[in-house]
Image (tube, helix red, strand yellow):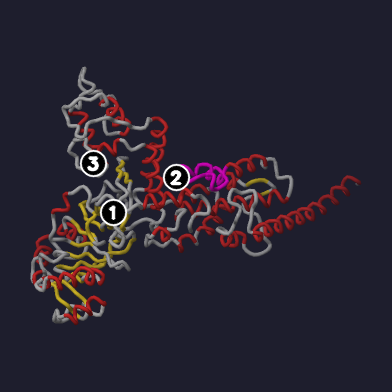
């Protein structure tokens, strides 16, 4: 009887003690969040996640997210494991206090001893999950802080809801993976990260003493080292030792490997090891590793995946690709050289995305105000025949029916002030050529043809004022209009070479991504590196090297 009485007393007291502990834990979590600091964390200031914490824990009574029965939940253990592996995505585990949280988790497997320790752990893991989720989903750096016209703010607001779902899901790892970019080149680039980390540990810093122009058939003591480097990089098959007894000879097999290397680095594949090729052969693998990490960061700034047809212009590669959703770079249906904006302020091609909505045959070139004022007006004043020779006209607006005005001094002054406009009439010598591909954007950037064909054969092709010139506009028009009704190649050519300006509105807009990627990987794992022509890699690297708090 006494034993039953004691058990009854304990059964009544235990719920009371449990309720009291829950209330204390709730109060401790709430106090820690309201303080705005967590002194145990590497970045103790919680201002970057304060709103997210408010969404995670909601209104009173606050309940822990990662603790059940005074122990870390399976979701907590899975999240901590993911934080430890953040470097697999080019991120830094230390940014998320992964080692600290792993130690706390292990110590708490037998149960937390104090309520305050439970509160500290739960909030710390929520902070780390919010930071990691945000960095994985939209990147560490706000793209607008480096001048990219990409907006990640709405997607960043989704992160707390995603993290809350992870804290309750039987498979939080799957939900984390869904935060990673779905852009076609992301997963191949992640795989390249693993490979280049291994190469950075194994390969010595390249150093070659070749003459200024080292050509096939010549010999040099550094040829074996070159052969070893190209084998490691995948340009030369494993076991390729060259001709019998001629290891110093630059033989045909090595020539093919050098050409493959040149193609992967945006160079003419001529097999000649000159200044440009030698500079890229001598680039430390650690530098290439940084490029890959920066490339992963920038891919997180792009929208979630692509649908249907889409176009990519990669500025540093001077290339345009056309593909369908589900296909990656390397499985594209369309590829051509492009000319992009010059590497000087005010003329660089901006980074953004939009939807192509129109194709115009025989377009007017509506001269941008700055070009009209700084280039066209001075040229007319120096040479009165310049206007007529180049088929320009002064107009009150860019409306198709606008009538040309006299090029007298008064009107030239009004052009210089922006009150009047200058445009170039349609025709084969028009700066836009015979095709214009439009996609709405605040930068007034578009794709177009050009009468100047010679620049497309150069290795480096940054010569425009910011718009993008395409090498094969007829082929691009065929691809764009493929699902837009009856547009066979002959009809497209007829409109382009006709006498009338005509604009076709696309039935289904085509996503256009203007990227700045100094590293690309195709689905087969072939990796290409390109020069940082605008210095965006340098800028991003400086910002990332500062660590938390990243410019958000």
Element under disc 2: loop
Viewer-nearest residue: 24 or 250: 250
| Residue 552 spot, x, y in % from top left | 48, 59
Q: Earlier in the sequence, mark 2 or mark 1?
A: 2
| Residue 37 spot, x, y in % from top left | 64, 56
Image: 423 above or below 86: below
Task: Single out the mark in the foreground, 2 or 1.
Answer: 1
State the CA–CA distance, disc 3 to disc 2: 26 Å
Viewer-nearest residue: 427 or 57: 427
Residue annotated with mark 2: 90
- Report which quarter residue 47 is drawn in: bottom right
Q: Earlier in the sequence, mark 3 or mark 2?
A: 2
Quick one: label 3, few (<14), some, or many (20+) residues within 10 Å? Answer: some
Residue 138 appears left or right of 444: right
User: Do labels 3 and 2 touch, CB within 8 Å?
Assistant: no
Q: Which mark is residue 315?
A: 1
- Magenta stretch, residue numbers: 78-98
Q: Which mark is residue 263?
A: 3
| Residue 315 spot, x, y in % from top left | 28, 54
Element under disc 3: helix
Quick one: label 1, few (<14), some, or many (20+) residues within 10 Å? Answer: many
Overall secondary structure of the magenta section: helix
State the CA–CA distance, disc 2 to disc 1: 22 Å
Q: Is residue 294 visible?
A: yes
Q: Earlier in the sequence, mark 3 or mark 1?
A: 3
């Amino acid at each position: 009887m006494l034993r039953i009485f004691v058990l009854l007393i304990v059964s009544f007291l235990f719920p009371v003690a449990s309720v009291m502990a829950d209330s204390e834990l709730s109060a401790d979590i709430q106090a820690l969040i309201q303080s705005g600091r967590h002194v145990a964390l590497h970045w103790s200031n919680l201002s970057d996640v304060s709103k997210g914490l408010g969404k995670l824990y909601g209104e009173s009574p606050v309940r822990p997210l990662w603790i059940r029965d005074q122990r870390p939940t399976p979701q907590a253990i899975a999240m901590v494991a993911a934080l430890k592996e953040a470097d697999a995505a080019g991120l830094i585990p230390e940014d998320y206090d992964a080692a600290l949280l792993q130690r706390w988790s292990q110590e708490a497997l037998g149960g937390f001893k104090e309520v305050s320790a439970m509160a500290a752990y739960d909030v710390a893991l929520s902070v780390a999950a919010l930071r990691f989720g945000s960095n994985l989903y939209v990147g560490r750096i706000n793209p607008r802080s480096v001048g990219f016209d990409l907006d990640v703010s709405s997607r960043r607001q989704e992160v707390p809801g995603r993290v809350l779902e992870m804290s309750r899901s039987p498979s939080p790892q799957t939900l984390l993976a869904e935060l990673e970019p779905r852009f076609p080149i992301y997963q191949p680039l992640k795989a390249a990260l693993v490979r280049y980390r291994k190469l950075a540990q194994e390969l010595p810093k390249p150093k070659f003493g070749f003459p200024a122009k080292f050509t096939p058939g010549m010999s040099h003591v550094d040829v074996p080292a070159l052969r070893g480097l190209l084998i490691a990089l995948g340009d030369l098959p494993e076991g390729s030792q060259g001709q019998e007894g001629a290891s110093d000879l630059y033989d045909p097999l090595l020539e093919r490997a050098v050409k493959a290397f040149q193609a992967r680095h945006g160079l003419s594949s001529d097999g000649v090891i000159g200044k440009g090729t030698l500079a890229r052969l001598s680039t430390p693998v650690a530098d290439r590793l940084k490029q890959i990490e920066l490339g992963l960061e920038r891919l997180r700034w792009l929208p979630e995946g692509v649908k249907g047809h889409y176009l990519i212009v990669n500025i540093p590669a001077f290339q345009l690709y056309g593909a369908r959703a589900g296909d990656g770079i390397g499985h594209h249906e369309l590829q051509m050289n492009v000319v992009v904006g010059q590497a000087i302020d005010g003329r660089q091609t901006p980074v953004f995305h939009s939807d192509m909505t129109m194709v115009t045959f025989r377009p007017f070139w509506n001269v941008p105000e700055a070009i009209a004022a700084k280039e066209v007006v001075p040229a007319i004043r120096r040479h009165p025949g310049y206007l007529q020779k180049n088929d320009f006209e002064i107009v009150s607006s860019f409306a198709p029916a606008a009538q040309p005005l006299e090029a007298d001094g008064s009107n030239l002054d009004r052009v210089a002030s922006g009150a009047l406009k200058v445009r170039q009439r349609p025709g084969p010598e028009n700066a836009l050529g015979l095709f214009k591909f439009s996609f709405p954007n605040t930068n007034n950037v578009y794709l177009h043809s050009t009468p100047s064909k010679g620049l497309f054969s150069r290795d480096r092709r940054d010569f425009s004022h910011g718009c993008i010139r395409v090498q094969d506009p007829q082929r691009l028009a065929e691809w764009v209009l493929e699902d837009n009704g009856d547009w066979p190649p002959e009809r497209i050519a007829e409109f382009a070479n006709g006498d009338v300006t005509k604009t076709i509105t696309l039935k289904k807009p085509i996503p256009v991504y203007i990227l700045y990627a100094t590293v690309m990987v195709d689905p087969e794992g072939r990796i290409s590196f390109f020069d940082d022509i605008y210095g965006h890699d340098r800028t991003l690297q400086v910002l990332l090297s500062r660590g938390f708090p990243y410019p958000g």
